[in-house]
Amino acid sequence: MSDTGLDMAKVTLQSVADEVGVSRMTVSNAFSRPDQLSKDLRERILATAEKLGYSGPDPAARALARGRTGSVGLLLNGPLSEAFEDDVSAEFVAAVADELTRRGLALTVLTPPQGDGFLPARDVAVDGALVYTCDPASAGVAWLERRKLPVVAVDQDLGRSVTTIGVNDRGGARVGAQHLLDLGHRRIGVLALTEQFALDPPNRDRLLGWRETLAEHGVEPVVARTPLLPRSAALAAATELLESSDVTAVLCFDDVFARAVITAATALGRSVPGDLSVVGYDDSRVATAGVPALTTVRQDVTTKGHLAAGALADLLAGRAASSHTLPTELVVRDSTGPVPAP
Amino acid sequence: MSDTGLDMAKVTLQSVADEVGVSRMTVSNAFSRPDQLSKDLRERILATAEKLGYSGPDPAARALARGRTGSVGLLLNGPLSEAFEDDVSAEFVAAVADELTRRGLALTVLTPPQGDGFLPARDVAVDGALVYTCDPASAGVAWLERRKLPVVAVDQDLGRSVTTIGVNDRGGARVGAQHLLDLGHRRIGVLALTEQFALDPPNRDRLLGWRETLAEHGVEPVVARTPLLPRSAALAAATELLESSDVTAVLCFDDVFARAVITAATALGRSVPGDLSVVGYDDSRVATAGVPALTTVRQDVTTKGHLAAGALADLLAGRAASSHTLPTELVVRDSTGPVPAP
DNA sequence: ATAGGCTTCTTGACCGGTACAGTAACCACT
DNA sequence: AGTGGTTACTGTACCGGTCAAGAAGCCTAT
């Protein structure tokens, strides 16, 4: 009988229904399907719910009954810090989140497990997932498949039947390499990710694009490798590359690496682009944030995120989703120039 | 009878139980409480589950039955892009996610609503939430309270009873201002966020710290304001500030703004720190990424994230969680110097 | 009058698990 | 042989909703 709104007993649909004197279903409709009852009654129900401190249908219960949670997962493999410390990843995640919000979905980050038996990719309720920068053979991907969740792969190949959003990395790498060749460079270095990323599609494709284009002109690049983090590693690798070889130009896996090469070159007394040409990749913020502005291969990460999120949303809505390969484009700025005279 | 593992009928605990010939509860225990049954039977159950393509207890159902989802929300207010385009926010999110992972929790991003009736803060199942950079009067915060979810506030005040993780921004601003005063500066500019952020605790506290310290020495700062995004806005505001006043030093809301001030000064032919001293805030990546390295007020964003996530995890585990105010520290580098001779 | 067609609300089954309180069997001890 | 303590499993009652079909009332067309 009491209805102070202060009773600590949990407030459910039923309690609101009892208070108003209607069936539970009618209260449910008041919240979820307004067109199913009279405006008048609906307002009475909502008012009573407010009075009782009922905050609307319990999301967990609703998720079970409806079969969807309203949230999609983003599967990442490295420690999260990696994904967010990198500008490009961060931009991608932001774009995904924005687009999902627009579609009425929330984003849940699915990290690799750590220690105990909790495995997000298996244990968190989501309606579908985006797979980004993951080892295709990872446990996470396997669980998603096992759960038969709709999946969209980004920058990686999960098999023919999976919708994939990618970038023409190989083509982008090709034009970057060609640009250096056109400038007359023949002793060319490459700063790629460590072997651990040998199968990472961006790393693989860029390396492939560079190699094949250079090979067409009989050039065999000097390959240096460095991990994505810590950032200091790239500088060391760049320094070592410049000291141990006589390259006149360097193709870099990304813009951050390119900056590291420039920093290393400067420290060694070599100017860019006077003594050394450097080509970045991504056209991220750092490309234009420093001096000289980087010649780089642009990819539209925000569009990639929008497309990926949109494709997954379509899949969830029962619509067909198509794969896309986004174009890349060489942006010539101030970090490349003609090969220096001997 | 068929058990090819290919039947498309949904595989549930019950179907596995029937196949093995035990009760549903026993199968549940095989997955969730291994100590409740014999090793032998458990293995038989797991094997059968594997054969049937059962991927473990359905997360949504489990969430309803157990009353927890294994995921916590992160409530943000701006469009997501803002949170991730900013290095400091991104670092915070990364730290939160890492710590949550360590604690066996996933992270769900709760964005403000957009258009239709879907409101993440109300409609997504989470066990608790972190409130970051939000208007305390926003709908999101109100819903979390209404749902009676455990909440930890970061860099903001949600009331005495809410566990809060903050930093000593006011004190940090004070030492920044004092540093300039000690160098002899008396005509000092301030580059803060627009009025729209008047109540944003970091912005308010920093402004307060600057103002009161300067006032103690009879200095009234020239205040310029600019939004966080787009980035170009800060440059324009900085240029305007330098052109319309004769300040010899500028205190900036963050390091990105400080870089903008330096860029503007350079464009106007003024050198830093020769003609102009600039103090940043945060000690983020950009503080040391360019030339000159910034004198700035350091805050440990990663620790802030770890603490916030840890506090929330504690709350969820039924442990008490305590509020913290992290220290700030002045880091003197190359962007500040003595006041120039007249 | 009667059939058909809304609108508005109700009924009963079901979503796929987990908690908790048994029950039965086995063992050791006195 | 009786008592008490384990271990291993089962039965029942929820968790808090939604779905689909049905019933009651009223209006309109024939």
Image (cartoon, coloured by chain):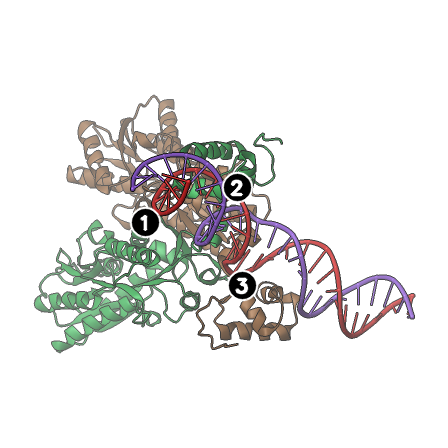
Chain colours: A brown, B green, C purple, D red
Q: Earlier in the sequence, mark 1 or mark 3?
A: 1
| Residue B270 percent location from the top left of the image | 18, 61
* Mark 3, residue position: B117
Q: Residue at x 15, y 40 (%)?
A: A267
Q: Who is closer to the viewer here, A193 or A282?
A: A193
Under circle 2, the secondary element is loop
| In-image side of A197 versus B332 (left or right) | right
Q: Is residue B246 visible?
A: no
Distance (Cα) linking label 2 and label 3: 42 Å
| In-image side of C24 versus A258 (left or right) | right
Under circle 1, the secondary element is loop
Q: Is residue A27 above or below residue A230?
A: below
**Subunit that carries the residue with mark 2:** B
| Kind of residue sitting beneath label 2 | Ser
**Subunit that carries the residue with mark 1:** B
* Mark 1, residue position: B103
Disc 1 and disc 3 on one polypeptide chain: yes
Q: Residue at x 45, y 45 (%)?
A: A304
Q: Who is closer to the viewer here, B270 or A299?
A: A299
Q: Earlier in the sequence, mark 2 or mark 3?
A: 2
